[in-house]
Amino acid sequence: MDTLLVILIDGIVYSSWLFIVAAGLTLVYGVMKILNMAHGSLYAIGAYSAASMVGWYFTNGYVPWASYLVFLAAAILAGAFAGLLIERGLLRVMYGRDEVVMILVTYGVLLILEDVIKLLWGVEAYFAYQPYSLVGRTKLLGITFANYDFVLIAAAVVIGAMLWAGLNRTIQGKLLRAVIHDRDISMAMGINVKRTFFVTFVLGSALGALAGGLTAPALSVVPGIGIEVGILAFAVVVIGGLGSVGGAAVGALMVGIARAIAVHTYPQVELFVIYGVMAMVLVVRPQGLFVSTVARKI
Amino acid sequence: MLKTDNTSRNLCIAFVLLLLVGLILPNWLAFLTTIALAKAMVVVGLVMLMRAGLVSFGQGLYYCLGGYTVGIAGQHLGITDAVGILFVSAFIAGCLAALLGLLLCRYREIFFAMLTLAFSMILYGVLVKTSELGSTDGFNVAKVTLLGWQPSPGQLSLVVYSLACLVAFLTAFFMHRYYQSGMGFAGEAVRENEIRVEYLGVSPQRVVFIKYVLAAMLAAVGGSITAMIAGHVDPEMAYWTTSGEFVFVALLGGTGHVVAAFIGAFLFEVIRTIAFDLAPYTWQMILGTTLLLVIFFLPKGLWSLLKAKKVGGNNV
Amino acid sequence: MSQDSQPRKNSRFHLTVFALIAMLTAVLSVGTPAPAQAEDGTFKLGLVTFLSGGAAGPFGVPARNAAELVIEAINKGTLPAPYNSIGIAGQAIEPIIIDEAGGGTKQVGEYRNLIQRKNVDAVIGYISSGDCMAIAPVVEELETLTVFFDCGTPRIFEDNKYKYLFRTGPTSTMDNVAAARYVLDINPDLKSVSGINQNYSFGKDSWADFKGSIQTLKPSVEFKTEQFPKIYAGQYGAEVSSLMLEKAEVIHSSFWGGDMEGLVLQGAARGLFDDFTGVFTCGETGMFRLADQIAEGTILGARGPFGVYAPKSPLNDWLRKNFMARYGTPPTYPAYKMAQALMGLKAAADKAAATAGKKPTQDEIIAAFTGLEFEGPGGTVKMALGNGHQAVQDMYYGQYSNKNGKPTMTNVKRYPADCVNPPDGVTSTEWIKNGLKQASCK
């Protein structure tokens, strides 16, 4: 019984992390139909910015509690800035290309960003562990958990709720949903689709970087951390259904809990969990879980 | 149907030239060209799928399968005949593709891409798990023989090079004809509008299925040739980055003509080698920039340049 | 998607053709060796280490830094004795550096480029065991002296015999046999062990060697959970929970680089390694950077007598002082291993030159290298296995302590090379399975 509960907690912690990583990706896809391969690099940029900020903050000995605001802000700003550069400098001239071509465009961005990160931060590891241990730990079910992991769950809930409310309860969000639903009609109705794209991409990039910033305290921030994360977020988003925020949440939960079960009962299969779940879901629901089948055009 | 056009003639000339050049090529360049030809085989299959509007992010599955077929046949079963292995690996890949194809032919767009990716990552996982096959370290491939003749290590690369040229030539020749057949055109029709294809009495599912199986067989042959020349296989061949590279090359060359894949593959290898040479620290940036420039200025790949010349020439 | 690209100008075509030709000439010309090169007294040395990806920070770049430092010193003749003569058998080293990224096939191609296009005299490199496996047969085909400096799989010299290939770094078998011995030395009543290793060759082999050695040395030890997360996974929450639930006294891990540091951090936040003793066979690289995160008593290895375990010697002092001065961090084991490979090559070439009385041929250097015993920054290196092509060294383990604010290793134990390496001709797996016979541990 205890093990079952531990599996559940571990699963939810991992799912929260997955959801935060995947939220930005699915938003960008939903609005712009761009599957952003460089999402992982934005995650890395966030992690690096947060880590350097934490390092600077704690060597100067400011109030430890305020560090959360500072390093998360640094991550968000860095991500938003990178997103702005990518959108204005590159994507804008590529809009209207085929979906697959856009994947390749973002793949090019990924390659470039990997080296840019290396040029900016070098290859030495960065650490930001102070905020990780600051919130302490809890003894539960006979084992110890880091409270920071619960912070991650809260962050996932807050981000999910804000996205939901933003999309469903604000005028801008409703306009965004109109664009998701039908780009051409929205344009005809006078929605500035280009601006919507711009805002979405910057927001999605900031979210990706925020995910990196939130994770940085538990990591050694080194080159290449974003690449695996990017492909992981892909899988989650595809399981949930591309472009659906709720779907990303469910996809994250499925992968997270499946992984926790594997780790606790049969660690040998951990490697297959994500792609196994993805293949199974796609076999049953070819469009992912939360997207209705589109009518075929004649 | 069988009258020779310009392309067929040019292909024959190119084949003979390549073979002759092989005799004077320095070893490293022959290696590079062979790898390029092998990868181009995969890309030819990928391009065939792309003409039907489908992008596979999992051709690494068959590429790796072909490589491991060579490795297992030579190392564990004692079968080293190069030509024989090519057929065997194409056959095995074809069987697997026929199985997966039954499922995949119902998928389109990004879902096709992601499901193919998932399958290739599952093979990657299986190989990582298999300690008998060396896990991620992979294992070395026994030297191949040709119809009972064992070439010396020095001759081997020339032999594999010539074999690669021959296979590439045959592929290009028949693929060119295929594109001009009804089945070839059906691919583009599927991309443009499936329902209209159905109204014409052709099953899009079947068209996609056949193309998928053919592409898989080509990828396996490419993987086999890579294993023969490199002398080593590892699960990296099935990793998503490998599959991504094939899509990269396909776009670099363009989908306009069967030869485009070969040009793209060769240029890709050259660019990457130069990037490694000139900028060991920032070669990824060079590759990324090249990709973006090609997409921006040559949306139809390098092939559009050659085509532009032809049409332009007629105008003058 | 459907409209054709507009055919514009004829010149566009010519431009591409021109560009293609220019590009190809560039590749060709970069590689065309000037005929005078062989005579002007330089020794062209290919260096291959990771410059990008996850292995660059912990391994590739420290190794490259050490190479830079040592090559410069060799060319000036400023290394301590016995390496205080100028150059490799009198020739100045001209390094050509290549990124190890891209996988086995790519590296075989790059290796061919180095030998056939750049005409290097020797190659030192390779961190990934997969790359080493792929390169090894090509070394014999191209007949150029090649030294592997870091990769750990024992399969290379156990599966085959090589003439042109050497490895100056010890195998990963040694790390794990010694780790098993050390764990039992400090805790003879050991009852249970768990493991967490990356799901790839190095991690799986490390765990198999460690588990096998424990089973041989103390069959009563119980094995609890065996975790194999994906390499570069980064998040180990569930794994840590599982390790905590299973309550094994000792947790073995061959994690390296960012993964190792991540596991240390995530374990520290939950007190995992306070309650159970961690054994990190590659833990030394993080020792100073994570000084206040590593639990007291954690067992750290350095894959040989490197880093903090390097015995005091003029060579070691030289490396520590100069590396620290130039790069601002103490040299970690990849740096030691690279320095060791360069010194081994120099030792062999100098010895061959002394015997020949002139610039030695490659065959003479190889003859001198085979079975050579030379001094490195980590002490004596014996090319004892694989017919004199594979190095063995002493191995050290110790427990981490940060009591007085200064990270140090306590309870350090030395295991002589013969104690933790199989005799020549016996494979590691057999040796461990058949009871670690002929090990002389005194």
Image (tube, coloured by chain):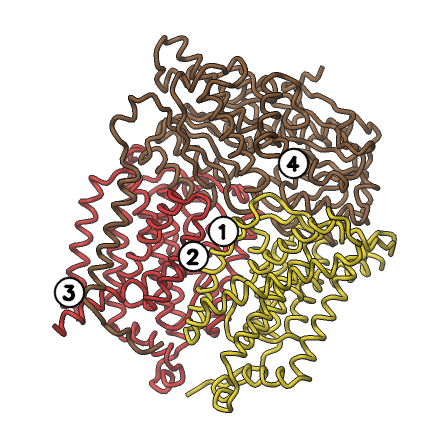
At 82% across and 27% down in the image, what residue appears?
C188
Name the tint of chain C in the rendering: brown
**Camera-nearest label, 3 or 1:** 1
Instruction: Tell me how far mark 2 sits from mark 3, CA to CA.
Output: 35 Å
At 27% across and 64% down in the image, what residue appears?
B303
Q: Which chain is red?
A: B
**Residue in the foreground of this view, choosing between A224 and B17:** A224
At 68% across and 57% down in the image, what residue appears?
A215
Quadrant location of the N terminus of chain B?
Answer: bottom left
Instruction: Tell me how far mark 4 sits from mark 3, CA to CA.
Output: 62 Å
Instruction: Tell me how far mark 2 sits from mark 4, CA to CA.
Output: 32 Å
Would residue A106 be found to the left or right of residue B85 on screen? right
Which residue was labeled with disc 4? C285
Which residue was labeled with disc 2? B288
Would residue C338 be found to the left or right of residue B220 on screen? right
Callout 4 amino acid? Thr
